[in-house]
Image (cartoon, rainbow, N blue to C red):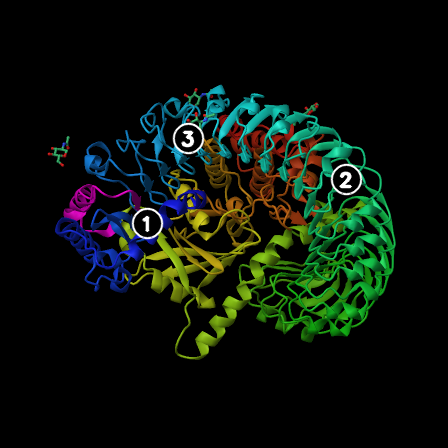
């Protein structure tokens, strides 16, 4: 879209210049009449403020959206830009008239009807609008037009933008008559079939072709190389397969080539190295293999081949061309070392998750423009060169998961622009030098899982913007600096698995995501005063210390708590009364009882009787770090939520409630029951009241909202952040939601409507009144019978098989029993299907490369691949099955249910012990069906992703389980 506008700025400019020169000339009677009529229809529609239309002026050429030009001695209408004018709300009786009037403006060259929520245009507009035969520019983007691509009659069209609609079907030769096209944008529709040959445009002026985000399949046809004027070619996010023809010599003007997110394979075409004009080439998320062609970066300045299967070493000429600005080779099979000769113009270098070895060259210090450096997940070793401190522009430094060692160099302290520093999972040792802790902008600091020792320097509290601090899994000793309470941005503090002791100081009020002090040497009573500032804390982990005495009542005032882990201490007395959504873990405290609620962990849990496994500490520390990792996403998600809650607090005290500023609100469903029930303003008032919260998960808060007519809906709040939504914007997210909203499966929670505000998204659902599967299994007093659990497993499998089976499969970022809601006891609905659209690690280009999910459900390979897969979803589903079979939570005492079940699955008599004995002996058929389902569950949680069954097969096996 943007590019079309750019292309046509010339046309626009000439229009505007001419009209400003003319003051005496007049628009003729006929055209004046037509414009009056058009604006009258627009005004009949309440959703457009009359100030926008601004047609008080006598000369219609001065009205909003109207552009005129001189033709002979009079003015004529050349341009109408009715973007976001609410045209779809024009009364249906005058809707066709509106378009007929448009068609009578013979002089029109430029028509923009984008963003009008149009679901269709009158047939006659495409088939019989002969009046507009001179039209050169037509923009219908960002509507909801749901039909096949029409046979266009506008023979003079130079720019056609149909992007962000619901156009379906194949294109065939429907566009062939538009031989003058310079720019064609069909992005983000539901178009099928092969890439259209566009034979009408062969050897023509076509410069820009954007076919991204559709369902185009098959291979890239040779016909594409017959458009020798192409400068911009975008085929990304389709289902293209096979090798890419090596014919790019024919596209000698090509500047941008985007092939990302398809299933393309074979080698990267060598002919690309000859294109002198090539500026940007992106082929990430495909299956390309082989070596990187020599000379690929000779001309290309921006290269992204991440998430492929490219092998070999980094040739010396790959990074050295001085024009190279950005290179991303993350997640391939690259080997060898990092060459020392690197372009001084490089601002982004991402080589993470390969098999690179050797040291970090000291010449890295010469890259004064370098802003993003990610080398995580390799086998790099040695010291961090002190010269790295010369990269003054560095904002992101990620060297995690390598074999780096030695002390942290003092030079790091010079990186004054750092925002994210991740050095976890290496062998760094020695103290944390206090001199380096003067990064004024750092928001994420992760040094976990190293061998750092000594005390935590009190200077850490100088990092005023630090939101996420993870020092877990080191040998840190002494006490937590008392100034920690001054860290007014701190959201999450991970200090688990160290040797910390002493007094726990007061924690800052900003701490909202997590506080993990587990596995340290803290003792004495849990200090109630330390946490009372952090009223919005979500996760508090005090497990594996030596805390004794009563659990303070004050912990129940933490109104946003979802997990409280007190396990393995010496606590005593009775647990105070927590909200039902708080998962309180108290095992391993012999004297602590829980009289008021069902224990979340079954005290008869088989491994609670065992001795602590020596591997447990390691496992737990990995888990802890992983937690930190996952929570990075949350950090950003939740860092904005605070602001929102503040508004809420103020609002509740005074009378005038400040509603968040709504940037967009739309109904997705067309079901008239919902469209008449849902009231956005009322809903926004309701979400300001924390009493309406009925559930919280890692990423979302759910509100129960009563609409003015008494009907109940669930509204889910998801916090927005630029950093997470990498490509695109709120507008794009809105579009994605509408696509998801069109899914129909009774086991999937589909959004009915959404509201976007500056920092949050609110999604509307039918209220699933029975709560989640987690609540049913672990928090309600009743024991669910097997019939019920079996129906739930079938329903979830059906929903997931459906999502995986979509033409563009929907992967779940976070499948857990907390994300499966129950409409009735045997009607489960999978929620949170939109999350993967929000946090897509493989697409993120900035600082975020964390995959997310819920601990216990995360497949082991995610730690290395950082890529969401169907097999990963199958693993999480396996954990859900195991939960249904065992009645146990996904993690207890640091051991994941899946690992526990796998380790007990060797002999048949051991398998018996896995099943929930409260129900497995109900009858012989129940017992045998549970045994069969257990086999399926174990297959789903297989360690190797390749050996897990596909959801379709899982569903079939579940149906047949007897
Ligand atoms: C096409 O438009 C003309 C006048 O605008 C009208 O007379 C004719 O009936 C239309 N034809 C069709 C097929 O709609
Ligand atoms: C480029 O466009 C011009 C018309 O604008 C056309 O004559 C020429 O053949 C095109 N070149 C190629 C290589 O297709
Ligand atoms: C492409 O998709 C269509 C359905 O839209 C299907 O009929 C066709 O077989 C597919 N072609 C290839 C090569 O996969
Ligand atoms: C990657 O390529 C190697 C050989 O180059 C091959 O053995 C391996 O199977 C490929 N992996 C994938 C996931 O395609």
Total marks in image: 3
- Percent from the top left, x then y, of residue 78? 27, 47
**Span of residues in magenta:** 89-115
Q: Nearer the viewer, residue 472 or 786?
A: 472
For residue 457, side relative to residue 28 (left or right): right
Q: Nearer the viewer, mark 1 or mark 2?
A: 1
Q: Is residue 516 above or below residue 385?
A: below
Q: Please report whichever mark, 2 or 3, sits nearer to the chain's N-terminal start.
A: 3
Q: Farthest residue to the front: give it.
A: 73
- Secondary structure of the residue carrying tag 3 is loop
For the N terminus, the quadrant is top left
Residue placed under numbered mark 3 in the picture: 205
Q: Neighbour class for label 2 at 10 Å: few (<14), some, many (≥20)?
A: many
Residue placed under numbered mark 2 in the picture: 378
At x 50%, y 40%, the residue is 789
- Percent from the top left, x then y, of residue 342? 76, 42
Q: Please report whichever mark, 3 or 1, sits nearer to the chain's N-terminal start.
A: 1
Q: Nearer the viewer, mark 2 or mark 3?
A: 3
Ligand 3 image-quadrant field: top left
Any part of residue 186 in sight: yes
Q: Is residue 510 magenta?
A: no
The quarter of the displayed image where residue 574 is located: bottom right
Q: Nearer the viewer, mark 3 or mark 1?
A: 1
For residue 366, side relative to residue 678 (left or right): right
Q: Which mark is residue 15?
A: 1
- Secondary structure of the residue carrying tag 1 is helix
Contact check, label 2 and label 3, Cβ < 8 Å: no
For residue 215, side relative to residue 52 (left or right): right
């Amino acid at each position: 879209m943007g590019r079309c506008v750019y292309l046509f700025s010339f046309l626009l400019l000439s229009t505007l210049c001419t009209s400003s020169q003319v003051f005496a000339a007049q628009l003729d009677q006929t055209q004046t009449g037509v414009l009056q009529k058009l604006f009258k229809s627009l005004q009949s529609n309440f959703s457009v403020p009359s100030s926008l239309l601004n047609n008080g002026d006598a000369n219609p050429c001065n009205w909003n959206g109207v552009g005129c030009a001189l033709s002979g001695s009079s003015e004529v209408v050349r341009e109408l830009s009715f973007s976001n004018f609410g045209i779809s709300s024009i009364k249906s009786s005058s809707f066709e008239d509106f378009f007929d009037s448009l068609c009578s403006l013979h002089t029109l060259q430029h028509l923009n009807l984008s963003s009008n929520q149009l679901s269709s245009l009158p047939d006659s507009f495409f088939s019989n609008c002969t009046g507009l035969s001179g039209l050169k520019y037509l923009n219908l983007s960002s509507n909801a037009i749901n039909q096949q691509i029409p046979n266009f009659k506008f023979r003079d069209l130079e720019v056609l933008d149909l992007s962000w609609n619901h156009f379906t079907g194949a294109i065939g030769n429907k566009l062939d008559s538009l031989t003058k096209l310079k720019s064609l944008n069909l992005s983000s529709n539901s178009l099928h079939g092969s890439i259209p040959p566009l034979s009408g445009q062969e050897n023509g002026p076509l410069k820009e072709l954007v076919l991204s985000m559709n369902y185009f399949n098959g291979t890239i046809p040779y016909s594409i190389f017959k458009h020798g004027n192409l400068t911009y070619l975008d085929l990304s996010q389709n289902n293209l397969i096979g090798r890419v023809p090596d014919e790019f010599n024919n596209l000698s003007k090509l500047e941008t080539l985007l092939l990302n997110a398809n299933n393309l394979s074979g080698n990267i075409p060598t002919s690309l190295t000859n294109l002198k004009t090539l500026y940007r080439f992106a082929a990430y998320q495909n299956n390309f293999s082989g070596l990187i062609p020599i000379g690929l970066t000779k001309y290309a300045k921006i290269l992204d081949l991440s998430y492929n299967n490219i092998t070999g070493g980094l040739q010396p000429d790959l990074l050295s061309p001085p024009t190279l600005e950005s290179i991303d080779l993350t997640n391939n099979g690259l080997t060898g070392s990092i060459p020392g000769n690197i372009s001084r113009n490089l601002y982004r270098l991402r080589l993470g998750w390969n098999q690179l070895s050797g040291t970090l060259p000291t010449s890295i210090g010469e890259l004064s423009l370098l802003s993003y450096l990610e080398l995580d997940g390799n086998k790099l070793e040695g010291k961090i060169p002190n010269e790295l401190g010369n990269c003054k522009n560095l904002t992101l430094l990620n060297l995690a998961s390598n074999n780096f060692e030695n002390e942290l160099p003092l030079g790091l302290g010079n990186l004054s622009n750092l925002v994210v520093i991740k050095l976890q999972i290496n062998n760094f040792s020695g103290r944390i030098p206090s001199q380096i802790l003067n990064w004024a902008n750092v928001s994420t600091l992760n040094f976990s899982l190293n061998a750092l020792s000594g005390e935590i320097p009190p200077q850490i509290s100088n990092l005023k913007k630090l939101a996420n601090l993870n020092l877990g899994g080191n040998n840190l000793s002494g006490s937590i600096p008392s100034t920690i309470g001054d860290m007014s941005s701190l959201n999450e503090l991970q200090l688990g698995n160290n040797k910390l002791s002493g007094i726990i100081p007061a924690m800052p009020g900003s701490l909202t995501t997590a506080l993990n002090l587990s596995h340290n040497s803290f003792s004495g009573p849990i200090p109630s005063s330390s946490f009372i500032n952090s009223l919005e804390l979500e996760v508090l982990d005090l497990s594996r210390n030596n805390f004794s005495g009563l659990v303070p009542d004050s912990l129940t005032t933490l109104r946003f708590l979802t997990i409280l882990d007190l396990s393995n201490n010496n606590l005593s007395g009775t647990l105070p009364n927590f909200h039902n959504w708080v998962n309180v873990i108290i095992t391993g405290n012999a004297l602590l009882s829980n009289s008021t609620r069902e224990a979340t962990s079954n005290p008869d849990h088989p491994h609670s009787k065992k001795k602590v496994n020596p591997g447990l500490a390691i496992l737990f520390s990995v888990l802890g770090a992983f937690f930190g990792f996952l929570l990075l996403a949350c950090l950003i998600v939740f860092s904005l939520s605070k602001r929102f809650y503040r508004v809420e607090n103020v609002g509740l005290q005074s009378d005038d409630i400040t509603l968040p500023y709504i940037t967009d609100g739309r109904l997705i469903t067309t079901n008239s029951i919902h469209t008449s029930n849902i009231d956005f303003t009322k809903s926004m008032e309701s979400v300001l009241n924390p009493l309406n919260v009925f559930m919280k998960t890692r990423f979302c808060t759910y509100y129960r909202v009563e609409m003015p007519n008494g009907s109940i809906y669930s509204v889910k709040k998801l916090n927005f952040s630029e950093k997470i939504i990498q490509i695109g914007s709120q507008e794009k997210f809105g579009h994605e939601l509408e696509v998801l909203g069109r899914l129909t499966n009774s086991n999937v929670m589909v959004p009915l409507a959404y509201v976007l505000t500056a920092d949050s998204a609110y999604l509307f659902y039918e209220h699933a009144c029975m709560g989640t599967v987690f609540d049913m299994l672990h928090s309600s007093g009743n024991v669910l019978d097997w019939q019920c659990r079996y129906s739930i497993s079938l329903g979830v499998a059906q929903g997931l098989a459906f999502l995986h089976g979509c033409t563009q499969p929907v992967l779940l970022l976070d499948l857990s029993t907390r994300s499966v809601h129950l409409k009735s006891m045997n009607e489960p609905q999978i929620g949170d299907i939109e999350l993967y659209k929000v946090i897509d690690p493989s697409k993120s280009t900035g600082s975020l490369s964390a995959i997310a999910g819920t601990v216990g459900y995360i497949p082991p390979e995610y730690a290395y691949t950082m890529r969401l897969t169907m097999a990963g979803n199958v693993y999480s589903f396996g954990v859900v099955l195991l939960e249904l079979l065992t009645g146990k939570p996904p993690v207890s005492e640091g051991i994941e249910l899946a690992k526990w079940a796998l380790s007990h699955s060797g002999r048949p008599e051991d398998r018996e012990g896995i099943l929930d004995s409260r129900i497995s002996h109900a009858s012989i058929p129940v017992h045998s069906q549970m045994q069969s389902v257990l086999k399926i569950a174990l297959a789903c949680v297989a360690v190797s992703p390749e050996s897990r069954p596909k959801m379709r097969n899982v569903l079939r096996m579940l149906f047949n389980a007897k």
